[in-house]
Image (cartoon, rainbow, N blue to C red):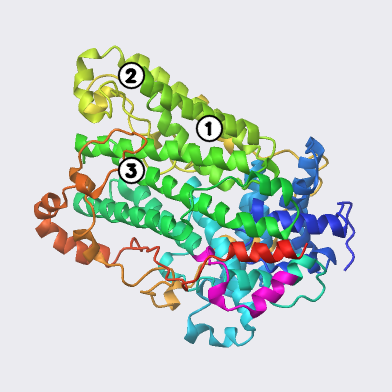
Amino acid sequence: MELDTELPIPNAQKLEQMCLALPHILPLAMIPLRFPEFISKLKNKTYPYYFIFAVLSVGIKTIKNSRTEDDKLLETKYARKSLELINKEKNISDPLIIWACSFICAHSSMVQNQKVHDQAIETATMSIKQTRLYQLNINKKTEKVIQKYTSNELEFRRRVWWVYYIQIVGNYIFNGKFMTFEQRDIVVNLPTSDFKWRYGGSIEGCNNKELKLMNIVANNQREIDLPQDCHRFLINSFALFKNIAVFVTKRWRKDHYNEDNTNLRVVLYADKLEKHKADIEKMFKDNLPSIQDEYINRRGTVKLIIDTEHHIFNYISRQLNYSMTIHLFQSELVREDSAKIRSERIKAAKSKCAKAAMNQIKLLEWYDHNVPAKYQEPTSTFWTVSGAIVLTNLFSIKDETEKDKYMNHFNRLISVYRSSEKYFEVLSTLVSYVYYIVEVKSKKKVQNKKLKHLHKHMEPFGIYDSDIEPWIIPKYGSFFHYNCCGEVNFSTLDIERYLGENITIENVFEESEFNDVHKEIRKSPDLQNDKDKKMYSEYIKNTSKTVVGYSNTKNITKSIIFDSESNISLLGECVDILGMKSTIAEESGNISSQNYNSSTVLKENKKKTEHNSKNSFIKRSSPNSSLSSKPVKRKSNTMSISFLLNNNE
């Protein structure tokens, strides 16, 4: 198929080089990747051009030594051309359309193009609704559909679905975007046999010697002798994060959870996070060793992927855990007259958040030091913004040693952001937003200084005696709920309101400044000579008219991604943050189960809890996500695979 376009397509050698870089910069978007087929079809241009341009929009920077403004413009043109070609497709049921949209979303997230991002999501959503890809494994309803495809085609569709799922979950958590598909309606098997899928299958058309060797290994080795699966664990991690985000978003609404149900859910998710952390330690074990030399000596090889991927997934999993920890425990710091949380709980939650924030920064520094900027994936970096804002809450303490510790971590984080702006333009705006938060805190500190007679009443809520300022916290989970909340998304910064005093308060949130910051985050890059203003196809225009047919589908009580062994009896066994003692945010200051007093709370709420746990939790959307995915037990054989590649050189 010849295409009449002025957009350049690199030669076959450059395209292969780009393919070998994509698993580094987009490890989650490459879950559907079958390497031999992917490289062959991209080099020979047998993929649809909308797919080729989508891949180029996010991957072309990996094959260039520098990145100019013209290069950035070209990337955006690739993305827009891909969408234009997709909109011309008469049949949008091809899963390649959904996968292409995930590449476009990745590009638009990096360069801050919200318009293109939204169009790609809407296109992918329309395709999924039409094909009911989200219910691929309901046997009775999809038996006829499944019979149309081979086992490989079905597995590809599953993996494409999970890439889309991770994308929309990330949008929900970070931006508060509406979740089109309810958790209970998703019935898609998790991916399995990651190594066999990626390197196995047909090798026809692929001349890469390393891939040929890996193809032999994948097609002939026993499953137990291959490197362990990681994709299912990461998907389950996002599912847990999504459930925590749903709870936190709804927690402080006036019309939602009662106090008993709220407390029980906090306990449940605190336990889930501890289990998630334990699963990470069990799966990855290592302490993230130096892999800097690998990127120097093995650049552009399959061996680089084999040797580093396990560590990158380790890094992503840990960043997710720390982000979830901050997301959950900062909701403990919201101050509302209707349900005031005890000071002991607030102090413990602050300690949790501060420790997680510092761990996020140490992780990011490891990543920035070991992985060249051109090979870095951006999403995990974006998650650390919440950690940066947590640390700004501790800039006003009087203990100079502790204050310097937090400010040092903060400055190191900003330094990493600055060094990565060349490839992820959105970071410059996120830095501006963080400094806007610092300014808001500084203004409020000046006002609160005038109320010294109230300072002693704030001391019980601080992890230090001088931690007397209310923390700046998102009331509904994320600071970036652009479309709904604005200033009301912030928990109060006023000591008077925090303590329940009725005193006239000056508003430190300058409305114009607040709006300017959010407009900056949402802005889209300008395109020169942009003649094509008609970006939406008829499919997209009608997206809002298409409703997922829930009314014709019975509720699915067992979603594939959840472990049926998880139930409400966990609540009596798990740790209870409701009575914990204060723990200062030190390097080794974990809050252990010994710091909790679960019996007190469970006795206090016994009568109410029995009724609520039966009625509220059984009907809940799905807070019982479990990370126990029960993969096939196998040895970690990355080293032996690398040995084969070394001997093949």
**Residue drawn at 31 percent across, 71 percent down:** 565
**Crowding near pointer 2: few (<14 within 10 Å), some, many (20+)?**
few
Marks 2 and 1, Cα distance to the nearest angstrom? 21 Å
Q: Tag 1 or tag 2, which sits nearer the N-term?
A: 2
**Crowding near pointer 3: few (<14 within 10 Å), some, many (20+)?**
many
Q: Which residues are magenta?
A: 213-232
Query: Which residue position is annotated with label 3?
Result: 329
Determine the main secondary structure of the stretch shown in magenta.
helix
The answer to whether any part of residue 648 appears in the image is: yes
**Residue drawn at 19 percent across, 37 percent down:** 342
Q: Are marks 2 and 3 in contact (CB under 8 Å)?
A: no
The percent position of residue 621, horizontal first and vertical second, equals 35, 63
Looking at the rendered image, the quarter that the C terminus falls into is bottom right
**Crowding near pointer 1: few (<14 within 10 Å), some, many (20+)?**
many
Q: Secondary structure at mark 3?
A: helix
Query: Which residue position is annotated with label 2?
Result: 399
Is residue 255 shown left or right of residue 203? left
